[in-house]
Image (tube, helix red, strand yellow):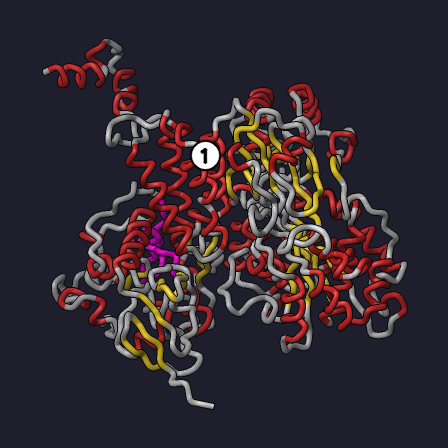
Amino acid sequence: MTDIPNTFNLDGEPIRFEPGETILQAALKAGHFIPHLCFSPEFKPHGSCKLCIVVVNNRTGSSCAMKALPGLEVQSDTPDLNHRRRTLLQMLFVEGNHFCPGCEKSGNCKLQALAYDLEMFNDHFTHFFQPREVDASHPDFFLDRNRCINCELCVRASRDVDGKDVFGLAGRGRNSHLVVNSPSGKLGDSTFAKGDKAAEVCPVGALLPKGQGFKKPIGARLYDNAPISQSFGVKEEV
Amino acid sequence: MTEAIVEPEILEPIIARFNGDPGNLLQILIEAQNALDWLSPATQGFIARSLDLPVTRVAKVVQFYTHLYDTPRGKYRVLFSHNITDRMAGSPALMAHMLKRLKLKRGVVSEDGLVSVGKTSCTGMCDQGPAILVNNRAITKLTLRRIDEICDLIRAKAPLANWPAHYFRVEDNIERADMLLGSAYAPGEALRAAIACGPTGMMAEMRKSNLRGRGGAGFTTAVKWEACRDAPGDERYIVCNADEGEPGTFKDRVLLQSFSERVFEGMAIAGYVTGARKGLVYLRGEYTYLRAPLEAKLSEMRRNRLLGMSICGVPGFDFDIVIHMGAGAYVCGEETALIESLEGKPGHPRIRPPFPVTCGYKNKPTVVNNVETLCKVTEVALHGGLAYAGTGTRQSAGTKIISVSGDVERPGLYEYPFGVRVSQVLEDAGAYDAIAVQISGAAGQCLTPQEFGRRIAFEDVPTSGSFMVFGNNRDLFEAALNYAHFFEHESCGFCTPCRVGSALVARIMEKIHSGHGARYEFNELTRISQLMSTSSHCGLGSAATNALQDIMKKFPTAFDRRLIKRDFEPGFDLDAALARAREVSARDDANAHLDAHLAEGADA
């Protein structure tokens, strides 16, 4: 029996992987960027945002959920896939209410950073303008559902790391929205605390620390100087 | 009207009956609502505390299933089936009539808290529509007169149990019977035949039969069973998918109503072959009326030792079946969403692999089979795999039940050997002026008369059984709009392309419908369809625009005659937006209208 090397090809480049790793995990570890929003190396793959789609054997799949196998030919950085990703971003932008110019998260926001990186120049679709509830009841954090993209990272962090189960995604279809586990449904009445893992995982500005504002000026932020495709391992300073 | 007071004396026995098991959360919520009419925050809190769950877990489930209510919806909750066949049979006029009689707005509960009237996805009564559900009980063949009677009963606050029994009669309408619908059946015969073969022998018969799943995808049943049997695990499950939600399908309803022992015996045989000892039937909420007779049938089979311990006296052959109810979610027909729902969660499809055969219900090896597939298992047991494979076509063995509805003289069930031509079905059902047939529901394909020579089979036109016929006075755009609304409503919301895409498609279709759509919108539909079909998480999203794309390609005039000739027009009516200003200023002369100015501008 011959040893099959644990490598697959990503856009023609060989990527080494440990058995059991997904395509996205292996690619990021090897320093190759595949756009993603609902994935974080610290949590179980979720596969809902679909930004990390790749094509393997003519079939599209989420690279965060597909196991890496020896010899796979994986396409990621292609005009077709980037076009699809751009459309997905536009969909997220029109579904929620994203006001980048006035948003404290601007420059540190993965949604915005990906939109720049994938050259999304406009929202394209008609905005939904859905009313979304803002919750400022917590002393240390805002919960602004206008910016929520349903990635469930806070849900997973609170459940799996903090052991608190503060968040849940309720509703169906485009009525899906974040709910808070407290008698009033308010964040301030929940067990959520600023040291929680859930407090640091939001890729957008839906869970935003109070008292920070524009302490770090626009221009000096995470994605201001290097696009997300080159700075994806770096963490935002809080 | 129910107040938001917790009623422990009502809730506690329900929770106890389900052993306080969080896995039964959906079942507990359904029963709680049956007793209390809605699920108040207090009720949800009480159930969460009793099951030791975060209240978000309860809220997630309540808000996911359309037939669970977190706001009061009245003592009588009337839902009109919104399927295109019900609409073609006149349901919009009937609903308008009812709303007028009860002085109601759609979806708004009456001031005295007595009644609400709304819409719901296909209720599976397409052969005897228009149909409604009243507190989840189906009433068929509605007429204006019947609506008036129902309004009177509601106003008189007559308990549903006292309404005339014939309202609730659901006919089988078997128009053409073959192997399954037409053969005599002795209870226990199939089980005994399977036992005579032994588990390995029966599996061999299944392989020879080449039986393929009847839910639509057509996966070979024996392969599924083998994978489940061979997967490591201390427990295995057989799940019967009775979430028949594909618009226009109603065959499973008839099989469960009049052939249920075959379904249950098929499940027991699957248990015998794979080593599973427990079976679950996931019955859609719209078929709640079938629950009691199915429970009675299960009891009868237990008495006759066709279920329970040592079935047919065979030591170690233990198998029993429980029924779980759904609560209005089409996506739960997808097998992994169905399993999530069985576990008491919202029906979000799982990431696959792993597949249910290795990691299904409670993460144990699980076979999920369609109702009709399980009936076919009894045929394989009785007649052997080779005999079974002798009918139908090379890749599609056996017979197939087709649910025919729409513009035909004789709607109902038609069972044929696979390979039957569409034209044959049309002729038998009395469709004389068909311009289109929508096969396999809103997620299937739309066939034109040029394609009526095609055959129903996995190698040509595969189908879960839905066969909706459109006569020559029908506008296929209306059907496409209906499907767009259907998918917008039924998308589970998990993945971006389906959640946002289905909503965008519905909006664009509405814009075209209102006369403001241009070629631009038409092209947008194709663009969004391409993304949804290639990039969605599950089959719902990837098939959601199949019918729409078919209609756009094959019936271009249905769209063309609605498209404006300009390149683009905004989705809102500028002149209509001035109506309020005209009202305030008490003006309605030509100069108070935008059109006049635009026309002037054009002249200049």
Q: Position of residue A152 (x, y in %)?
A: 41, 62
| Side (left or right) of B524 relative to B567 | right
Residue in front for this viewpoint, A128 or A155: A128
The disc labelled 1 sits on which kind of residue?
Answer: Leu
Return the residue at label 1.
Answer: B481
Where B370 falls versus B328 (above or below)? below
Q: Secondary structure at mark 1?
A: helix
Q: Chain of mark 1?
A: B
Give me the residue at 66% from left, 62% from top. Answer: B221
| Side (left or right) of B126 relative to B198 | left
Q: Position of residue B546 (x, y in %)?
A: 46, 44
| Side (left or right) of B41 relative to A6 | right
Region rendered in magenta: A131-151
Give me the residue at 40% from left, 79% from top. Answer: A70
Residue in front for this viewpoint, B458 or B547: B458
Residue B576 sits inside the magenta stretch: no
In the figure, residue B120 lies in which quadrant? top right
| Side (left or right) of A157 relative to A105 | right
Crowding around mark 1 (Cα neighbors within 10 Å: few <14, some 14 to 19, many 20+) is many
Give me the residue at 32% from left, 31% from top. Answer: B517
Q: Position of residue B255 (x, y in %)?
A: 74, 46
Q: Quadrant of the C terminus of chain B?
A: top left
